[in-house]
Image (cartoon, rainbow, N blue to C red):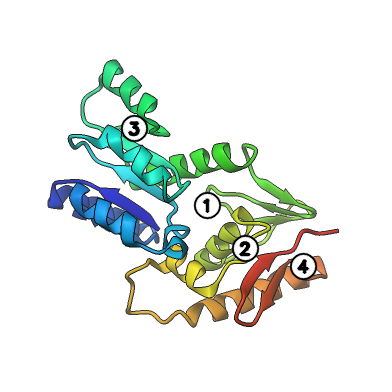
Amino acid sequence: MYIFIEQRPEVSAAYVSGFTREGWPSLGLRSEEFREWVETTSDQDLRSVQGFVLGDFDGRQNYPDLIRTHSRAPIIALSEVRSLEQTLKLFSAGIDDVVPKPVHVRELIARSDAVWRRLNMNSGPSVKGRLKVHFDGRDPEIDGDPLPLPRRERLILEYIVKNSGRRITKAQLFNSIYGIFNHSVSETVVEGHMSKLRKKLRQRLGYEVIEAKRYLGYCFVEPS
């Protein structure tokens, strides 16, 4: 899920719509709404955020400190005017990337993933034994051969691999794929996606790489 912070409703709506078209849940908030949201949202829901995108509004250089007290997700600022001085100030404030407008939502997603890899793992795909997982829209590979997956199954696998070593709940997976405030779909859809994903991985690998425990959630199992 992506959080878009912007004072102009029409701009926020356009980007939220763009994320939706690309299959990513998102939430548009005004700066004052965001402060209340980030301080009251549960840690579990915050862990579902893939990235924060800051529009061009006054005082945004103060937001990285606020965000970092709650989340490690990438922070990207949009710039309407090319200004070296402004860009340097934003980087100094803790912004992870500054992107000039206009920019396509796909680029924001790609940049967010690149920042995430830089902050949390070595650059490039994650290799887990015979399994290689990309974070740029490509299907994963097993023994060098692509494993075609529907988009939601691929996103679940990427989220699980990004959080290797941690147990992920069904609610976390649902929020990361469908969005925190999506009430039109039941969380039980995650179980169906996960069942199909685990079966495909097991058939190709010959062993289980995603452990499922009732009431506890899912965890990526490192191959021995």
Q: Badge 2: how crowded within 10 Å, few (<14), some, or many (20+)? A: few
Rendering coords of residue 71 (x, y %): 44, 49
Disc 2/disc 4 C-alpha distance (Å): 12 Å
C-alpha separation, residue under disc 3 versus residue under disc 4: 40 Å
Residue at far top of view: 85
> What residue sits 25% from the left and 48% below the top?
5
Q: Which residue is mark 3?
A: 99
Q: Considering only order in the chain, which callout, 3 or 1, is on the residue closer to the N terminus? A: 3
Residue of label 2 = 148
Q: Which residue in the protein does label 1 denote?
A: 137
Dot 2 falls on a residue whose secondary structure is: loop
Q: Residue furthest right?
A: 224
Which residue is under mark 4? 204
Q: Position of residue 89 (x, y in %)?
A: 31, 22
Q: Residues within 10 Å of mark 3 (few under 14, many from 20)?
A: some
Decide: is 99 above or below 162. Answer: above
Image location (x, y in percent) of residue 151: 51, 64
How far apart are labels 3 and 2 at the CA level?
A: 32 Å
Using a 10 Å C-alpha cutoff, classify the residue at mark 4 as few (fewer than 14 neighbours), some (14 to 19) or many (20 or more).
few
